[in-house]
Image: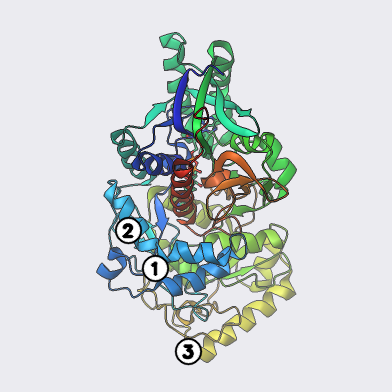
Amino acid sequence: MHWDIEADVVVVGFGAAGACAALEAAAAGRSVVVLDRFAGGGATALSGGVVYAGGGTPQQRAAGVTDTASAMFDYLSTEVGDVVPPGTLRQFCDDSVRMLGWLESHGVPFEGSLCPDKTSYPTNRHYLYYSGSEVSARDVAPPAPRGHRTRGRGTSGGLLFARLAAATRRAGVQVAGQSAAVRLVTEAGRVTGVECRSLRGAPWWARAAHRGLHRAARKPYLYVPKAGRLMHRPVGWLEQRYGRPLLVGAARGVVIAAGGFGASRELLRAHAPSARGGLPLATPGDDGSGLRLGTAAGGAAALLDRVSVWRFLSPPPALLRGILVGADGKRICDESLYGAAIGDEIVRRGGRAWLFADRATIAAARRQLRGGALWFQRLQARYLLTFGRVSAGTVAGVAAKAGVDPDGLAATVAAYNAVAASAGASDTSASDTGPWDTGAVSADPTGKPADLVAAQDQPPYSLIDYSIRARLLNPAPVLTLGGLVVEPGTGQVLRADGTAVPGLYAAGRSAVGLCSRSYVSGLSIADCVFSGRRAGRHAAATSFRFGAG
Ligand SMILES: Cc1cc2nc3c(=O)[nH]c(=O)nc-3n(C[C@H](O)[C@H](O)[C@H](O)COP(=O)(O)OP(=O)(O)OC[C@H]3O[C@@H](n4cnc5c(N)ncnc54)[C@H](O)[C@@H]3O)c2cc1C
């Protein structure tokens, strides 16, 4: 085989997982090439930059938070289930403090400023927060805030990736951009390289247009997928017209870290119909090509039907006092659960949901919006409080306006208000913004913390629409969670019979990982770091060297 480029380890995809795999392989003294269809960054660079970590990180200690690896393990067991063996989850939790330290050693900054509210994403004043359903699961494990947001303004995933990318280049890794992997090369049953379609030899203007158009389309793609797809169309044409084959040899191993499949309507239709009406949290690079490369080489895929659908009620945190109901008027779940857990519950009940709230709750929510949220959170909440809401002077009246069963709603509201009255927690004039009482014991049957169970008895009443359907200003974000099946100790891609595909590894959202059953904020990037490092380390350590006899 004649290779255009050769290295010990070849990584396909330059997001969080790919960068971490490359860093570990380079640290082991191996030559590493990273291929990316564009310039790298992927979903990681657009993300919130939240990393799930605990067990007593320096940031938790600085915030006065007590946490242990075993509490983290107990809580995460409820989210992760059996998608990875308990030993793998245990290792993730035991190594969590070191993992955050490793990221910091590569320039990624974190900070222990604790957010006092339950929120989907903290403002620029806070960088540590409850990013899952830890408080609702306080019977399982003592709750602790574990969402470590990269310290940087706005959505800080861009900074997280920039720091990892700089570290990767400092480590001597060669990054080959504008090179899309289209096929894995297999010799004698072992993956030994990658065939790409590359713009490396294309005219400068075609490369510049490819780079510029992709960059310009990324954000529209995220918020208005139709517009993003339209803007991105010429990118595919440029690749077809000017792309040339590039063969990259991998003496020790290939790591697939090419993201998920949220941009593939075909794969979403086939595997995750519940994502319909949601807004894929993806870039055009998340077209499932990593998955296809792996399965074409014999790898098995799993949990492709697992998608995380997000429905956050807070900010504003006052809305957590409301009552989330389905079309039958019945309560759906603890409203303080993490947004992806709420989304799961709504999907399970057919995708329709409303939040019942009284005058005091709506007024408090409006007040909180003045300073306690980032611009996109404010925009969504204002839209919901203005256009996404119906109201009436009676419970029956508001139910009729929304198309919710009035008897079911009346019974649910009466039961909720009775719990609030018995707990003496109906004072909705109490502080608007917390601090959140994470220790309070609750009489609420869903386990919602007592200080959030406030009577909804002051007319007029509102029902705010949280159904899962396509809406520009209140989309339901959707993240694909399944991928290639990997060996938990090494990250090697496995066939359906459980044997490994020699020379092939997968990481991040191209693989089944810690967040493949249910997502809490930060768990995807934390899994990218964990699984990327694991794959890079093992690919580098393999004693087999193709071509060396
Ligand atoms: C708006 C938003 C906010 C989010 N916030 C968070 C958060 O705060 N915390 C969290 O944990 N998760 C968050 N997520 C999810 C998280 O960002 C992703 O799941 C994670 O970053 C995926 O990382 P990855 O390395 O697997 O893939 P990516 O970061 O997507 O990288 C994959 C790379 O592979 C390249 N590629 C694809 N196909 C090919 C090919 N055939 N050949 C060569 N290259 C290819 C792509 O161009 C891309 O650069 C968020 C996602 C979004 C969109």
Residue lying at the far front of the rendered structure: 549
Please tell me how crowded label 1 is: few (under 14), some (14-19), or many (20+) other residues with Cα within 10 Å.
many
Most foreground residue, 529 or 457: 529
Residue identifier under label 1:
145
Q: Residue at x 29, y 46 (%)?
A: 106
Residue type at mark 3 is Gly
Please tell me how crowded label 3 is: few (under 14), some (14-19), or many (20+) other residues with Cα within 10 Å.
some
Q: How is the image coloured?
A: rainbow
Most foreground residue, 508 or 331: 508
Image quadrant in which the N terminus is located = top right
Q: How many marks?
A: 3
Please tell me how crowded label 2 is: few (under 14), some (14-19), or many (20+) other residues with Cα within 10 Å.
many
Secondary structure beneath dot 1 equals loop
The image's mark for residue 105 is none
Residue identifier under label 2:
127
Any part of residue 41 in sight: yes
Secondary structure beneath dot 3 equals loop
Q: Is residue 328 above or below residue 490?
A: below
Q: Position of residue 74 (x, y in %)?
A: 51, 73
Asked if labels 1 and 3 touch by Cβ distance under 8 angstroms, the answer is no
Residue type at mark 2 is Tyr
Residue identifier under label 3:
424
Asked if labels 1 and 2 touch by Cβ distance under 8 angstroms, the answer is no
For the residues marked 2 and 1, what is the alpha-carbon distance in whole angstroms? Answer: 10 Å
- The answer to whether mark 3 is within 8 Å of ligand 1 is no
Any part of residue 464 in sight: no
Q: Position of residue 23 (x, y in %)?
A: 37, 41
Q: Residue at x 42, y 36 (%)?
A: 41
Q: Position of residue 279 (x, y in %)?
A: 59, 44
Residue lying at the far left of the rendered structure: 62
Callout in the foreground (2, 3) = 2
Q: Residue at x 46, y 61 (%)?
A: 92
